[in-house]
Amino acid sequence: MLSQVRAILAAAGATVLSLGCAENAEPPAIGPAVYPAMNAAALATVGSPGVQDLPFGEALLTYSRNLSTLHADQREQTDAGIRDQVLWLAVILERMPAAATQPVLRSAAGHIRAMMEPETPTVEATKRALALAADALLVAARRGYSMEPDVAPLARAFAGAVSAIDSARSPPDRAAVVAALVRAERVLAVMYAMNVR
């Protein structure tokens, strides 16, 4: 039920302090405090998800759990975690029900995987991969979610966060990359909630 999704998203607001290293401005869409309330079994009971929604929801849940462990000050661990999260974005794009009718989502997923192939991708490659994800979600927001007023602003905020990554900065701008990953989580969580109404 939509009320359950809203409760999950509201509970996530309480996690903003625990995820302060990712971003302090707004609470994440999903965070550690809500995992007991939202697990793989719970995803099957939120709203009325169809069979096509469950792989999307499960991938989003894994992404959210992994995102909660990223801390921008852990350097090498964060670099590996960022790479994994960007690869999870590719999985999510492919698993979105909209991917069946919007080839841009599947195409972006393939390009993202290619960019993240090196074990230690550069910040520039990571930024380009995130930009592909942001563009794909902007297209999805325009086409499949045009009647949902919350989706487009969140997709634009994700794209803006990606643009704000300074790929030339030394040391690498890990905090900005993690902030962009959090923005991606927010738009994807709202898209999932819209799907299962």
Image: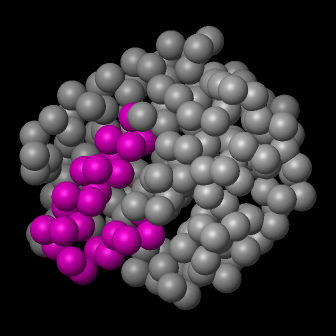
| Residue 158 visible within the image | no
Q: Is residue 13 above or below residue 129?
A: below
User: At 44% across and 20% down in the image, what residue appears?
Assistant: 106
Indicate the quadrant where residue 111 lies: top left
Q: Nearer the viewer, residue 161 or 116?
A: 116
User: At 39% across and 34% down in the image, what residue appears?
Assistant: 90
Q: Position of 32 compared to 193: left or right?
A: left
The picture places residue 50, in percent across and down from the top left corner, at 75, 28
Report the magenta residues as a range: 67-90
Residue 71 part of the magenta-drawn span = yes
Q: Main secondary structure of the magenta part?
A: helix
User: At 30% across and 32% down in the image, what residue appears?
Assistant: 112
Q: Is residue 161 above or below residue 152?
A: below
The picture places residue 76, in percent across and down from the top left corner, at 13, 68
Q: Tell me the quadrant of the picture where the C terminus can be found.
A: top right
The picture places residue 146, in percent across and down from the top left corner, at 77, 30
Q: Position of 56 compared to 125: left or right?
A: right
